[in-house]
Amino acid sequence: MDKLELMKTANEVRKGIVTAVHSAKSGHPGGSLSAADIYTYLYFEEMNVDPKDPRKADRDRFVLSKGHTAPGYYSTLAHRGFFPVEDLTTLRHTGSYLQGHPNMNDVPGVDMSSGSLGQGISCAVGMALSAKLSGDSYRVYTLLGDGEIQEGQVWEAAMFAGHRKLDNLVVIVDNNGLQIDGKIDDVCSPYPIDKKFEAFNFNVINIDGHNFDEIDAAFKKAKETKGMPTAIIAKTTKGKGVSFMEDQAGWHGKAPNDDEYATAMEDLKKVGEELCQK
């Protein structure tokens, strides 16, 4: 898929995020929107996955460590064909398989249930180690929030991954600068993020998380890197694509009302129209 198609797909993913959270009347749009380009690249370009065979043995694995941004994950999986896009409107509804956090037992394409911050990366490290011990070729990807990396368990996992030279592991940090209580550097600064991962023997790449050329180059470099895991620090904008949500901590975990939903969808429609003219 070329860059323009990736941009168009990411915009559709964002529409799905806003629609799902509006329908649920709850959820986490801000961090889902900031990570939409990363989600899109992973599932439409990078990862070896098959919607017709979600459990195939040699598939690449993905663990959403910041599990509250499930709307972004679900929208990506739906647009990739793992389940109907129409089901996004059932998010968080009673009886829906699309719960507030991903459930690997119910959602096609989900490799690990997640939700409690800090734990997802540990699961991903375990998967990567398993592949090494079994001689399997699959790669493992995990997406963390920059507020999430204030959790100590993240650094225990990083220490282990670096020590075991897990070069089949890619850790992506969605560095949108905001968490539920405000700016990450005001709440409990994790900076410098890149130097911390370097200290744990990671190959570290800093990118603009909305630039598909930089995203593409980073994941290609990660595949070429041997003898150490890779951490991609993606600088992003919380609420990306929706005018009134961008860079606003208040949209970390809040659903748009009907008027706000209409405005958000109009914003994304305009983006789509502009992309179609390129």
Image (cartoon, rainbow, N blue to C red):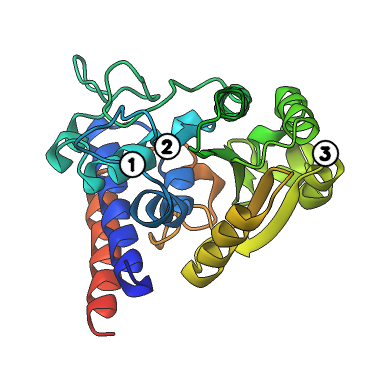
Image coords of residue 143 (percent x, y): 54, 40
| Residue depicted at x 37% and y 43% | 72
Image coords of residue 156 (percent x, y): 77, 24
Q: Which mark is residue 26?
A: none
Badge 2 amino acid: His
Q: Is residue 164 visible?
A: yes
Is residue 113 positioned above or below 189 on the image?
above
What residue is shown with label 2? 28
Q: Quadrant of residue 109?
A: top left
Question: Which part of the image, by quadrant, shows the N terminus?
Answer: bottom left
User: Quick one: label 2 or label 1, which is nearer the N terminus?
Assistant: 2
| Residue depicted at x 40% and y 24% | 101
Q: Give the label, 2 or 1, closer to the camera.
A: 1
User: Quick one: label 3 or label 2, which is nearer the N terminus?
Assistant: 2
Q: What is the distance, in whole Å, between disc 2 and disc 1 at their CAs?
A: 26 Å
Q: Give the label, 1 or 3, closer to the camera.
A: 1
Q: Nearer the viewer, residue 189 or 11?
A: 11
User: Quick one: label 1 or label 3, which is nearer the N terminus?
Assistant: 1
Image coords of residue 30 (percent x, y): 46, 46
What residue is shown with label 3? 200
Q: Which mark is residue 49?
A: 1
